[in-house]
Image: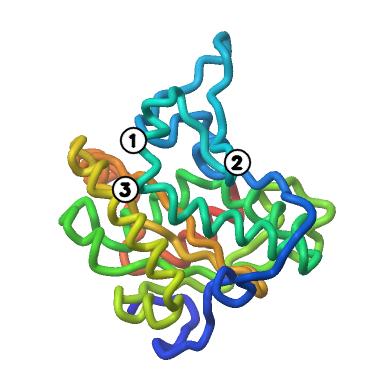
């Protein structure tokens, strides 16, 4: 386990979707997933043309967008589990009165996609062996900076710790719903591998009582090798991640 700080492998923390499952809500906050932030089709990754009609969002969770009905239909068997969890999260967050806080957290991490992707590549040493993508999961915990109100969105949070959990430790930590989400990530990753990429990997991000499982589409093997050749964080990935987020 690589760490900045430490989290015991028998932690009792669970994902927020487990903790607050079943709560109702009267409002659905507008949370944007990576697909919407990057303006790319969630299935084929086609970039949205600003001069053409905007891509349509998933009618249920609103977190991802598609360039066509064909892509939406192809994606649904893989997206439906995450879609259900996303809807339950939104309802629960609104009921608990933390929707805006969570929205800020999600917006913050959506602004650092390339930094987090670099952390995954270096932490799992994917440039050396792309198969390491299935060997473990990154877990990070962040907190709001004391002066967050005076800072731009991309600098409102800072890293407290970062560790790599084995798949077994991760499932123990996240519980049944976490397993469904991770299984869904793996299925989507297989599609990316078939297209020549390394696949897809999550970072489990904890902020206060909220745990967000955020998926990242990884580069092709040659891309990962180049990333590490240019700037390899190695075993100090968590310290380097903290610095990169601090100075982004």
Q: Nearer the viewer, residue 235 or 175?
A: 175
**Residue located at (81% from left, 65% from top):** 97
Quarter of the image with the N terminus in it: bottom left
- What percent of the width, then of the height, locates residue 174? 45, 76
- What percent of the width, then of the height, locates residue 3? 42, 77
Q: Quadrant of residue 169?
A: bottom left
Q: Is residue 203 visible?
A: yes
- What percent of the width, then of the height, locates residue 230? 31, 44
**Residue located at (52% from left, 39% from top):** 64
Residue annotated with mark 1: 74
For the residue carrying disc 3, how many other residues have a C-alpha within 10 Å: few (<14), some (14-19), or many (20+)?
A: many
| Callout 2 secondary element | loop
| Callout 3 secondary element | helix
Residue sticking out furthest to the top? 51
Which mark, by number, is residue 188? 3
The Cα–Cα distance between marks 1 and 3, rounded to whole angstroms, is: 11 Å
Q: Is residue 111 visible?
A: no
Colouring of the image? rainbow
**Residue located at (21% from left, 61% from top):** 132
Residue annotated with mark 2: 62
The Cα–Cα distance between marks 1 and 2, rounded to whole angstroms, is: 17 Å
Above or below, 236 against 247 in this view is below
Q: Earlier in the sequence, mark 3 or mark 2?
A: 2
| Callout 1 secondary element | helix
Q: Quadrant of residue 23?
A: bottom right
Q: Nearer the viewer, residue 211 or 218?
A: 211
């Amino acid at each position: 386990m690589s760490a900045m700080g430490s989290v015991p492998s028998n932690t009792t923390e669970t994902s927020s979707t487990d903790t607050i499952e079943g709560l109702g809500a009267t409002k659905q906050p507008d949370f944007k997933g990576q697909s919407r932030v990057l303006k790319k089709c969630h299935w084929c990754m086609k970039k949205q043309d600003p001069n053409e009609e905007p891509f349509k969002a998933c009618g249920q969770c609103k977190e991802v967008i598609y360039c066509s009905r064909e892509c939406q239909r192809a994606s649904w068997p893989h997206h439906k589990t995450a879609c259900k969890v996303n809807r339950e999260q939104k309802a629960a967050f609104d009921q608990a009165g933390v929707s805006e806080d969570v929205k800020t957290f999600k917006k913050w991490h959506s602004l650092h996609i390339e930094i987090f992707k670099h952390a995954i590549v270096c932490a799992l040493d994917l440039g050396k062996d792309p198969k390491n993508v299935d060997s473990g999961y990154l877990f990070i915990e962040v907190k709001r900076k004391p002066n967050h109100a005076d800072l731009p969105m991309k600098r409102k949070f800072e890293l407290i710790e970062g560790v790599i959990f084995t798949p077994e430790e991760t499932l123990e930590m996240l519980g049944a719903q976490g397993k469904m989400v991770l299984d869904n990530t793996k299925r989507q990753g297989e599609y990316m591998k078939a297209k020549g990429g390394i696949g897809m990997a999550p970072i489990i991000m904890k902020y206060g009582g909220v745990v967000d499982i955020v998926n990242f589409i990884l580069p092709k093997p040659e891309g990962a090798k180049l990333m590490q050749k240019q700037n390899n964080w190695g075993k100090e990935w968590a310290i380097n991640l903290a610095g990169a987020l601090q100075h982004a």
